Image: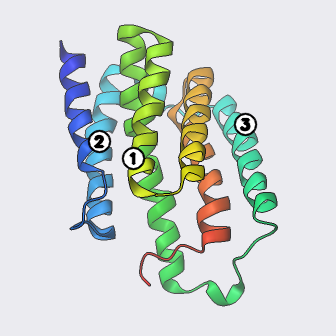
Amino acid sequence: MLEIIILSLGFMIHLWSFPYPFKNYKFDIFIAFIQLVFSIPILIRMAPETIQLTGLSVITGLSVGFAFLIFHIIYNRGIRLKVSDISFGFLLSQLIIFGIQIPAEDFLYRGIFFAIPKNIWGTLVALTLSTSLSAMLYIARWRRPLYWFGAVLIGFFCNLAFYYTGSIWTAVIIHILNDFGYIALNEKKNIFS
């Protein structure tokens, strides 16, 4: 019963994460903090092994993550980020995206929406639920079908890596390297400009 309550609350946070007209990056950061404050204590209590950083999680995360990073560089025919693009706002954006938002998403989608359903309904249901919910978030944000495929793919690989290593940090590392290849090196994302 407790697991169902936790999943229901997590689902409400998931719905709150969708892009609405009134939202901005300050609100997104607030949501990321809510995701972390919600997810970390639950994982510590219900699945403490998932928040341990292990050698296997680092090696797996770096291996898969660098494959995604290299894919983005090859697909975009190089790196578009130039030294002139790097400003205080750009660096602060990267710190927020990679230090807060990505870990928050993974703690919610891989931690809560994978670890808990896996214990209740099994791995296949957990994999489907977690991948679908995280992909929904990106489908709502982006209007490009190619991004949708990428969101499903990265979510699926993050979940598989999390399942394989048992550590949420594997998914965080993969997600950071993937988004670094796309968001920082090619999109040059600056949330303050």
Instruction: Identify which residue is drawn at 67% across, 69% down.
Output: 185
Q: Which of marks 1 and 2 is nearer the N terminus?
A: 2
Residue 135 seen: yes
Tag 1–tag 2 contact (CB < 8 Å)? yes
Which-is-in-front pick, marks 1 and 2? Answer: 1
The residue to which callout 2 is attached is 14
Q: Is mark 3 on a helix, strand or loop?
A: helix
Residue 139's spot in the image, x, y percent? Answer: 44, 48
Instruction: Identify which residue is drawn at 31% across, 61% down.
Output: 28
Viewer-proximal residue among 30 and 131 = 131
Viewer-proximal residue among 77 and 37 = 77
Instruction: Identify which residue is drawn at 47% across, 72% down.
Output: 93
Q: What element carries label 2?
A: helix
The quarter of the displayed image where residue 181 is located: bottom right
The quarter of the displayed image where residue 133 is located: top left
The residue to which callout 3 is attached is 59
The residue to which callout 1 is attached is 137
Instruction: Please tell me the numbered disc located at residue 63.
Output: none
